[in-house]
């Protein structure tokens, strides 16, 4: 009995040790490492196989969608042209920045069929269009001065008291823990200089794709409604903000039409 429990204790120690190493890496991976679906860095099939988010993923892509061929200048500028001339985003968001960010997230739009991939692109840009007013806004507007979006329970991502973690970028990255994690994965100081997301368009799109691949990508196959729930469900879904839900759906349907794919079922949430 004694020997057995000693063995068990050792085993626990070993497992905890492995976990601790992995957690430390939480997707701030070395160049030769993959970021697994659970945000662990490593080079094994568990990391680089199914669900792999970034790095040298080995998952055989199931479609041949070329994102740059779908997100053409015409498509991107078609959104930007809806924004008024004096919009700050007009001289900030660019297709080139989106494509630069895409290099860090090569699994985007690669799940399922080509049509699934196109629907994922349509969904991403539908949310971005809604969140930013057709790429007009870089920063969230009308944030109450007392609201810094600092969740102090997330002790892994301590807030800098002089910084504010309100919405910035294509998907309006918000909260200290999202800035911290997005920064770790994309080599910038998310907690110390959240304003980077509003100053560097490449990083801005990287944070949007980080959020997408971490929180939304896996919902795409369940229909557009599930992506709304993943982005802002508690605020908008279940009848809370039907106008906003409808706005997102309309952009999604429009982009699906432009890409020549059916929008699929379960559009609302
Ligand atoms: C953004 O990405 C483009 C394309 O990769 C690159 O040429 C440019 O220098 C980058 N900009 C910044 C500020 O890093």
Image: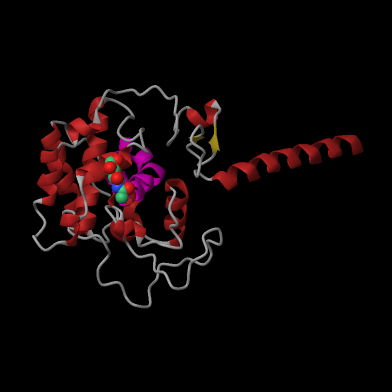
Q: Position of residue 56 (x, y in %)?
A: 45, 29
Q: Is residue 232 magenta-colored?
A: no
Q: Which residues are magenta?
A: 204-230
- Looking at the magenta stretch, what is its main secondary structure? helix
In the current view of this chain or complex, which residue is farthest to the right? Answer: 2
Q: x, y percentage for residue 19? A: 64, 42
Q: Tell me which image quadrant ligand 1 sits in.
A: top left
Please tell me which residue is depicted at 90% across the width and 35% down the height of the picture: 3
Q: Nearer the viewer, residue 254 or 110?
A: 110
- Please tell me whether residue 2 is drawn above or below residue 234 in the rendered image: above
- In the current view of this chain or complex, which residue is farthest to the bottom? 146
Residue 4, image x and y in percent? Answer: 86, 35
Camera-nearest residue between 269 and 200: 200
Q: Is residue 219 magenta?
A: yes
Q: Is residue 188 left or right of residue 259?
A: right
Q: Is residue 166 at least partly visible in the picture? A: yes
Query: Quadrant of the rendered structure where residue 179 is?
Result: bottom left
Location of residue 140 (image quadrant): bottom left
Q: Would residue 148 appear left or right of 114 to someone viewing this image?
A: right
The residue drawn where x is 19% and y is 30% is 69
Q: How many marks?
A: 0
Quadrant (top left/top right/bottom left/bottom right) for the N terminus? top right
Q: Residue 135 placed where, x, y %?
A: 19, 54
Observer-nearest of 216 and 222: 216
> Is residue 256 positioned above or below 80 on the image?
above
The image quarter containing residue 255 is top left
Residue at x-position 23% and y-position 35%: 119
Is residue 229 visible in the rendered image? The answer is: no
| Vertical position of residue 100 compared to residue 142: above or below | above
């Amino acid at each position: 009995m004694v020997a057995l429990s000693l063995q068990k204790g050792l085993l626990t120690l070993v497992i905890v040790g492995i976990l601790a190493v992995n957690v430390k890496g939480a997707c701030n991976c070395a160049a030769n490492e993959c970021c697994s679906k659970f945000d662990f860095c490593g080079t094994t099939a568990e990391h680089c196989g199914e669900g792999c988010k970034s790095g040298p993923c080995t998952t055989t892509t199931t479609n041949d969608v070329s994102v740059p061929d779908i997100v053409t200048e015409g498509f991107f500028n078609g959104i930007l042209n809806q924004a008024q001339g004096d919009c700050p985003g007009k001289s900030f968001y660019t297709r080139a920045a989106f494509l630069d960010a895409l290099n860090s997230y090569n699994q985007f739009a690669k799940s399922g069929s080509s049509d699934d991939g196109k629907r994922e692109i349509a969904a991403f840009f539908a949310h971005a269009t809604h969140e930013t007013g057709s790429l007009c806004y870089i920063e969230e507007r009308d944030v109450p001065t007392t609201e810094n979006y600092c969740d102090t329970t997330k002790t892994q991502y301590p807030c800098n008291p002089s910084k504010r973690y309100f919405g910035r970028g294509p998907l309006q990255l918000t909260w200290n823990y999202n800035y911290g994690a997005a920064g770790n994965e994309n080599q910038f100081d998310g907690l110390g200089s959240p304003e980077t997301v509003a100053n560097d368009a490449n990083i801005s799109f990287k944070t949007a794709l980080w959020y997408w691949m971490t929180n939304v990508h896996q919902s795409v196959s369940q229909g557009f409604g599930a992506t709304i729930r993943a982005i802002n469900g508690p605020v908008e879904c279940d009848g809370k903000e039907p106008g906003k839900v409808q706005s997102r759906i309309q952009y999604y349907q429009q982009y699906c039409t432009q890409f020549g794919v059916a929008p699929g079922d379960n559009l609302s949430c």
